[in-house]
Image: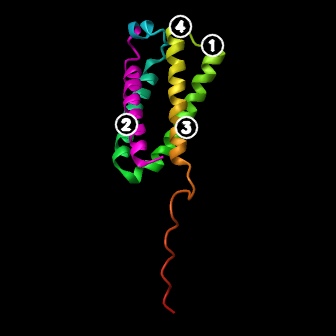
């Protein structure tokens, strides 16, 4: 994956994380969650903390899009986070133990799909030959 393409993925993920984080930060707004057929986290403080963390991660994604040294480690960390998110959403949707309506199921399925695609894109960028980059130069010879 080229650096330009990875920048686009980072920026998309940053916007997606801000939007999801906003939804989590509004975790005490019963009317919004009812309208979206989504379950509310109890207690809402954990959902709101998750939203704050997503905003912090969105900022890191935005920085990585502009800082070549951050691109590879952030892509690898994002692959891990999105893979875990995908697995959690799929398990919750399969076991159908959360109280969601049709729209909620659709939104959670869409979130799982977006996370799966982001995982694949980040893995494509983060899994490359050479590991973490070139080997450091050998230390200078000690005087004899």
Task: For the residues labelled 3 and 1, say whether their Cβ atoms are less than 8 Å apart.
Answer: no
First-in-chain label (3 vs 2) = 2
- Around disc 1, counting alpha carbons within 10 Å, would you say few (fewer than 14), some (14 to 19), or many (20 or more)? few
* Label 2 sits on residue: 11
Residue at 63% x, 13% y is 96
Position in image of residue 87 (x %, y %): 60, 28
Position in image of residue 97 (x %, y %): 62, 13
* Label 3 sits on residue: 120
For the residues labelled 1 and 2, the Cα–Cα distance comes to 32 Å
Specify whether residue 118 is painted magenta: no
First-in-chain label (3 vs 1) = 1
Which span of residues is magenta-colored?
Answer: 1-30
* Label 1 sits on residue: 96
Residue at 59% x, 26% y is 88
Badge number at residue 102: 4
Residue at 50% x, 12% y is 104
What type of secondary structure mainly makes up the magenta span? helix
Q: Nearer the viewer, mark 1 or mark 2?
A: 2
Element at badge 3? helix
Task: For the residues labelled 1 and 2, say whether their Cβ atoms are less than 8 Å apart.
Answer: no
């Amino acid at each position: 994956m080229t650096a330009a393409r990875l920048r686009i993925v980072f920026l998309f993920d940053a916007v997606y994380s801000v939007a999801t984080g906003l939804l989590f930060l509004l975790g005490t707004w019963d009317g919004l969650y009812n309208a979206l057929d989504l379950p509310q986290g109890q207690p809402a403080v954990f959902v709101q903390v998750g939203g704050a963390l997503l905003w912090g991660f969105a900022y890191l994604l935005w920085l990585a899009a502009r800082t070549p040294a951050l691109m590879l480690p952030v892509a690898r960390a994002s692959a891990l986070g999105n893979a875990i998110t995908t697995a959690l959403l799929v398990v919750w949707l399969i076991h159908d133990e959360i109280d969601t309506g049709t729209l909620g199921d659709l939104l959670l399925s869409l979130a799982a799909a977006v996370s799966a695609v982001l995982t694949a894109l980040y893995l494509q960028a983060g899994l490359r030959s050479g590991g973490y980059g070139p080997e450091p130069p050998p230390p200078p010879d000690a005087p004899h």
